Image (tube, rainbow, N blue to C red):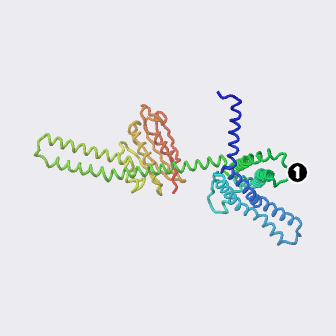
Amino acid sequence: MISTEAAVPRLRGRALTTALGALWSPRSWRATAHALVGLPAGVVSFALTCGLPVGVGYSAGWSLLYAPGSDWASTTALVVLAVVLPLPLLVAVPGLTALHRRRFRSLLGVTIPPLPRRDGTLPRRLLGELGTSALWRQIAYHVLALFIGTVGAAVTAAFWLAGIGMGVVLALQLTGVWDNERLPSASSGLNVLVPAALLAAPWVARGVARVDTAAARALLGPSRSEALSVRVESLARSRADIVAATDAERRRIERDLHDGAQQRLVSLAMNLGMARANLTDTPEPARRAIAAAHDEATEALAELREFVRGLHPAVLNDRGLDAALSGIVARAPLPVRLTVAVPSRCSPVIEAIAYFVVSEALTNIAKHAHAHHAEVTVEHATGRLRVVVTDDGQGGATLGRTVNGDGTGLRGLAQRAASVDGTFALHSPSGGPTTITVELPCES
């Protein structure tokens, strides 16, 4: 074990090495430059956001107070000045904020997250900023920047200049240029003050930079609610992109299967059908093999068509939701009444989700509901596509299971609707009827 007497000198040596290393560390010099540049930047920020508006407003107020009542031109000009005065302030604040962000990024390598950008024209954005806390937080920082810049630059410069200046004096004394007899008190504390000031200067600069960075993050960056809002918007855009990419990939697979494998199966089934019809003089085992192969090819082709239709029906892209749903209803094993009132088409993703909702709902009705009749209504109103599927079956369906305990796929339909910020509602009391209502965003 290392004794305490041996550990103390080692710790002192490490501390001295760290302190000496800070003198020529790039981080220390960047923090020093940041503190010194903060003074003129703070003066400009304070002057444009507080000094100029307050000074001009104060002068205008006193001029209005003591202006003669008959001087309507001066009074009107001062009133207009008082009203128009905040507008340049609103324009200057974002520019000053960008200037300080650039200062933090270039000198300290610190990135201050940008504030959420408002949409609309410039006057609307400016007026909208008045009611937000972001504008007043920025103004607060620009006012505070004068005090942080002044104190930070003064303290940082004082430590560096004191250390360097006293070092120069000590060097002059050691070389004999400085006469200690004329100023006997000059050398009394130099041996302590010179290293103390020099070693403390980098850490003072870093401390000033740390305080300034904390203030900038709190006042120039987005608040927690604004950051969460930006995050939600980003996640919503990412989710929409993923849904759109998935739908595009599904359409590509459907197109490749339709143009490739399905055409080959059609050709194979036709050739086997011709062989089955023409090769009547072949042995019986060969005819049975050809017939079995033809039947298998026909069934595989039918299954592939159903699979392709389940991926993404081509009629949905070509003729729209009404024609695609009509095909589903025509293939349904029970009578279905279809009503479609959609004057304009929605996006391909929304139409695909509506199609699969109706398809899955009718499949569940045929398998589990023991219904005799079903009804499908699709309508477009107030920017929403509303899909309602009703049956007269036994009811009791839930998102997790049917009355028989079998999976229904209803949870998958709810997830599809939620992926585009849609809603899914299921009403299925025991004994029926069952109603599925899905609303999807569909701007016309």
Q: Which residue reaches farthest front?
A: 176
Q: Position of residue 22 (x, y in %)?
A: 69, 47
> Which of the two residues, 342 or 294, is positioned nearer the viewer here?
294
Indicate whether 354 appears above or below 408.
below
Q: Position of residue 92 (x, y in %)?
A: 71, 61
Left or right side of 19 for 66: right
Which residue occupies 70% across, 29% down? Answer: 4
Give the residue pinned by disc 1: 181
Left or right side of 353 for 258: left
Q: Position of residue 77 (x, y in %)?
A: 80, 69
Residue 158 visible in rendering: no
Is disc 1 placed on a helix, strand or loop? loop
Quadrant housing the N terminus: top right
Q: Which residue reaches farthest top?
A: 1
Residue 41 visible in rendering: yes
Q: Position of residue 373 (x, y in %)?
A: 40, 42
> Which of the two residues, 420 or 149, is positioned nearer the viewer here?
149
Indicate whether 75 appears above or below 138.
below
Q: Residue type at mark 1?
A: Glu
Question: Can you tell which quarter of the image residue 393 is in?
Answer: top left
Are there few (<14), some (14-19), or many (20+) residues within 10 Å of tag 1? few
Which residue occupies 35% across, 42% down? Answer: 333
Which residue occupies 20% across, 50% down? Answer: 271
